[in-house]
Amino acid sequence: MPPLVANALESTDAEGADMTRNITEAIPALLAEGGALVTSSACSPMELAIARTEDRFFVDADGCGFVLRYRQWREHAERAIANQGMPPSLEETGEFVPPAEHGGEG
């Protein structure tokens, strides 16, 4: 278990306030926010730190951490997936075409 998650149940900020929420609060928060609930292992250390300060970090009884990502993050990810075309295959063109050259965004 990552160190940030292992000690999450005892985490407090500089003023001693708890920086985590119980996982039972995650679903109501997800329904209210409309974002995405992801495991903390999918997050960077910076995202974990920010989520904790913004009260978007949840921990279950086993000490596993979860982050509530913003609705805008989910919408951006969905747009990126929908707009991401597959480049023509090497078999189709005889040469590799990088994504930026075939109309993709990156």
Image (spheres, helix red, strand yellow):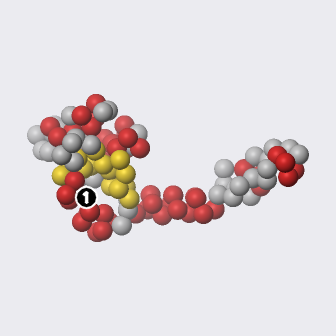
- From the viewer's perspective, is 38 left or right of 55? right
Q: Quadrant of residue 68?
A: bottom left
Q: Residue at x 85, y 52 (%)?
A: 92
The three-letter code of the residue at mark 1 reads: Ala
Residue 98, x across and y down, in percent: 75, 46
Counting from the top left corner in percent of width and height, residue 91 is at 84, 48
Viewed as shown, does residue 104 lie left or right of 20? right
Residue 43, placed above or below residue 29: above
- Provide residue 74's location: percent of width, then percent of height: 45, 60
Farthest residue toward the top? 3
Percent coordinates x, y for residue 94 in the rendering: 88, 46
Secondary structure beneath label 1: helix
Q: Residue furthest right?
A: 94
The residue tagged 1 is 26
Give the residue drawn at x 27%, y 37%: 5
Q: Residue at x 14, y 37 (%)?
A: 10
Would you say residue 92 is visible in this rendering? yes
Q: Is residue 72 left or right of residue 60?
A: right
Farthest residue toward the left? 16
